[in-house]
Amino acid sequence: MALDPDIFDALLDGVRRFVSERLRPLEAQVSETDEIPDDLVQDMRELGLFGLSIGEEFGGLGLNMEEEVRIAFELGRTSPAMRSTFGTNVGIGSQGLVMDGNDAQKAKYLPAIASGEIITSFALTEPDVGSDSGAVKSRAELDGDAYVLNGSKRYITNADKADLFTVMARTGGPGPKGVSAFLVPRDLPGLSVGKPERKMGQQGAHVCDVTFDNVRVPAENRLGAEGDGFKVAMRVLDRGRLHISAVCVGAAERLIADSVAYAKERQQFGKPIAEFQMIQAMIADSVAEAKAAKALVLQTARAKDRGERITEDCACAKLIASEMVGRVADRAVQIFGGAGYIADYGIERFYRDVRLFRIYEGTSEIQRTIIAREALRNEG
Amino acid sequence: MKILVPVKRVIDYNVKPRVKADGSGVDLANVKMSMNPFDEIAVEEALRIKEAGNAEEVIAVSVGPAKAAETLRTALAMGADRAILIETDETVEPLAVAKLLAKVAAEENPGLILLGKQAIDDDSNQTGQMLAALLGWGQATFANTVTVEAGSITVARDVDGGLQTVKLNTPAIVTTDLRLNEPRYASLPNIMKAKKKPLDTKTPGDYGVDITPRLTTLKVAEPPVRSAGIKVADVDALVEKLKVLGVGA
Ligand SMILES: Cc1cc2nc3c(=O)[nH]c(=O)nc-3n(C[C@H](O)[C@H](O)[C@H](O)COP(=O)(O)OP(=O)(O)OC[C@H]3O[C@@H](n4cnc5c(N)ncnc54)[C@H](O)[C@@H]3O)c2cc1C
């Protein structure tokens, strides 16, 4: 149910203020140290950021999709690594449980996920399984009252901090219909997490391998029915893609604001570079593209809140928004000139950070594949 | 004891104010408004006193337009227990606010009234002092630290060149300075719960207070733009210039 507009505005204002006063000043430090300071994580918990998408009955805020993307626009205005801290609890780490968990599973885990007491991860990708995610090789064999889980997962966001993993593993024959989803607590014997990978950007957010060596997962931890795991994952990703699209819009708005401020300040040939039409054209293109992506994200979020099927729309939003922010970041580097390439200005950092949005939660090619599949099925 | 915290809805401190073309005041159309930062410090201090077990209830009160309810909701989201809005669209000067607050104090019998030392819109720095006079209570302005004991309150005040410590018998008036504390962020769940906390709406008429302005604003103008300086070649030239301007020895 949608919140009263007054209350929602107050929430939005609270997030906006936290982003500008608490998160933005720490961007360079987080990037340098590759760590989110503990006291900052604690402040994020206290603010309630881990529970944005979890129901009020479990201590979260229970935002609907439109509200969630409007909050994500604000969160996008700082380093994406900041959002990543609680991003898995809001999105891919918790939503399988929110959508398909049974009452006992929800009661057991959701309150601690909403409060940020436990961190969650989503483990689909494997060393040999990326875009073709229906081909997961990790296996879960039922043995008495537990599934015995074997295999390994790759590039798992927040794995180093996670207490609970949503793991997709094969329980049946080949193909997507042979996959089931499991809630796997980190402390089960046989589960190990590798060292964080070194990455191009988003320092402060970590991805690691997760390996399962005869991990006995209680049968009651299966999420949904056997063979439903891929469906669970795809529904989680539909929602996740929309959230990421909103973050892309927020990042673009931030980059545009920084570009405009710099262009008005920086003087060449005796006047601010903002007075040159070629600079203005870059700003105009960025503004127009960001607004178009924002409109698409909002429209898709509203359709989701009305209960419409939005797979195609989410893929469109993710494709348009992630490609858009790539171009906006590229123009921002150009408008900043040499400073755009120098670390202290933070623009090159954003340029590297936003590159990820075209890759994870489905590459741009995979979004196009989904859109084409839906279009060929439903249109014409 | 109860603590009363008056809060004012003012232009947000991040906004660059624009003066209306006719010079009658600052243009507030479509401008972001927030709680006066000094009042936020007052709310925070009241909550800390309550959390330390030295107060039972924190009541926020605001005098202003219907929208001032949002400012009260902020105080409630931070942790105040209930709120009173004295609604009016008229201009209310510090004396009128102080008279209204004196009436609220008579009804609520707070042991402490914590106010911001001034509001960042008109910078009057008068309401707390006028209220102390109207109630005949002791006052400590520009509080840097506040310590509550049984029957008294000790306040270290920010004064030129250091701190001055004063002890007040309760009930008392304290106005907050910038260094008193760092206000908390209202958590998102608390922002949602604030809607369910009680907020009474009254009018100045309910208290029988005449709020007619006693002052007339003649003109509001932008601060003068600083004109560019000049460069002088050396110290001699500097001294020469200063003499011409009449500031040299
Ligand atoms: C920082 C980071 C965080 C991540 N977090 C998580 C996480 O938390 N959980 C998780 O499960 N995964 C996570 N991933 C994995 C991510 O989702 C995958 O990397 C992504 O889906 C692509 O898979 P891949 O890397 O195997 O690339 P591949 O699938 O090998 O793709 C390589 C290239 O081939 C293209 N391609 C593949 N198939 C097709 C096709 N059919 N048609 C056209 N082109 C195609 C791709 O678009 C790409 O350009 C993360 C990755 C990164 C880098």
Image (cartoon, rainbow, N blue to C red):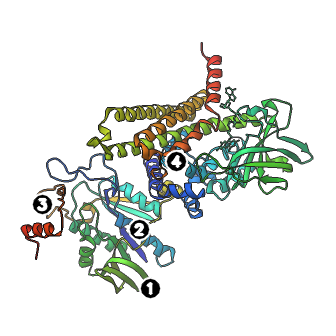
What label does residue B43 carry, if any? Answer: 2
As helix, strand or loop, the secondary structure at mark 3 comes to: loop
Q: Earlier in the sequence, mark 3 or mark 1?
A: 1
Q: Secondary structure at mark 1?
A: strand
Query: Label 4 sits on what residue type?
Result: Arg
Q: Residue furthest right?
A: A144
Distance, label 4 to label 3, CA atoms, is: 53 Å
> Is the CB of the residue bearing disc 4 within 8 angstroms of ligand 1?
no
Report x, y in % for residue B238.
15, 67
Task: Choose between A25 and B35: the one closer to the eye.
Answer: A25
Check if mark 3's residue and mark 1's residue have beta carbons within 8 Å: no
Mark 2 falls within which chain?
B
Q: Which mark is residue B149?
A: 1
Which part of the image, by quadrant, shows the C terminus of chain B?
Answer: bottom left
Position of residue A243 measured from the top left corner of the image (x, y, whole percent): 57, 40
Q: Categorize mark 3 by other alpha carbons within 10 Å: few (<14), some (14-19), many (20+).
A: few
| Pair 4/3: label in front | 4
Q: Who comes first in sequence, dot 1 or dot 2?
A: 2
Q: Quadrant of ligand 1?
A: top right
Report the chain holding disc 1: B
Labels 4 and 1 positioned on one and the same chain: no
**Badge 2 element:** helix
Q: Chain of mark 3?
A: B
